Amino acid sequence: LTSAKGCDSIIATSLTLDSAYYITTSTSICSDTSIFLGGAWQNTAGVYYDTFPSSNGCDSVVVTTLTINLLPVANITGITTICSGSATVLTADSAGSYLWSPGGEFTQSITVNPLTNTTYSVTVTNSCGSSMSFASVVVSSGISAIFDADPASGPAPLEVEFTDQSTGANSWEWDFGDSQGSSTEQNQTYTFDNSGQYEVILTAIDSVPGCSDTSYTNI
């Protein structure tokens, strides 16, 4: 610059550059809600940027990492048809805290051995809410293996008619005790070619859930 007297005037200016101010933060919301980030309402996990003017005229940038927490969805898994006197394990397959009924247990899995058909429930709770699920455990009414052998004795070769009288069975396994004969028929006629005493075994089976009972007789 030139002064009024023709002399130069020199102005020395010191320039300082202030950088933008970054703030990093994180937050979480439930999957059924939203939050205002990045200039819009968000309900998807990700990283969002918001810019604000600061007091010194520079920008402040807030970087937010958003996490979405899912609502609990309770569901009970496990074998729900059992034999009388047996036990089964029921499991809640959703994360959270647990409350079972009946029983009042707080674990993710429970072992039950009801005497009669019983319905169980579990309530799963997390920071976003609760969910309930039900499962009915059916106890097989019981199976009894009984059969008749006619005749039960006689000279060899001896033909014997075996008649099933079991209850609750839908499949059968015969062992005629001579290391040769077996059958899966409900009723069976079998010939014992050689003299001797043979222990005949009938296993009566209820294929669902696999309960069985066994009966014996000597020929």
Image (cartoon, grey):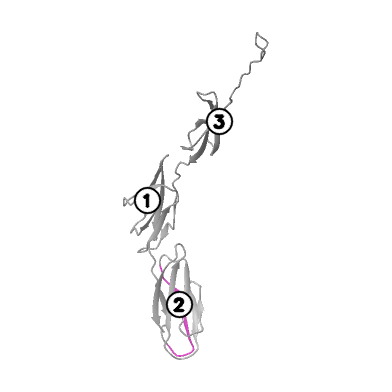
For the residues marked 2 and 3, what is the alpha-carbon distance in whole angstroms?
A: 94 Å
Q: Please tell me whether residue 73 is drawn above or below residue 148 in the rendered image.
A: above
Q: Which residue type carries mark 1? A: Tyr
For mark 1, does the 10 Å Cα neighbourhood hold few (<14), some (14 to 19), or many (20 or more) residues?
some
Marks 1, 2: nearer the viewer? 1
Q: Please tell me whether residue 32 is drawn above or below residue 58 in the rendered image.
A: below
Q: Which mark is residue 20?
A: 3
Find disc 1 in the rendering and name its residue: 120
Q: Which residue type carries mark 3? A: Ala
| Callout 3 secondary element | loop
Image quarter of the C terminus? bottom left
The span picked out in magenta is 154-166
**Would residue 118 appear left or right of 62 to someone viewing this image?**
left
Residue 210 in the magenta stretch? The answer is no
Q: Residue at x 39, y 75 (%)?
A: 215
Q: Residue at x 39, y 80 (%)?
A: 217
Find disc 2 in the rendering and name its residue: 162
Total number of numbered discs in the rendering: 3
For mark 2, does the 10 Å Cα neighbourhood hold few (<14), some (14 to 19), or many (20 or more) residues?
many
- Spot occupied by residue 178 in the image (x, y as percentages of width and height): 47, 85
Sequence-wise, which precedes: disc 1 or disc 2? Answer: 1
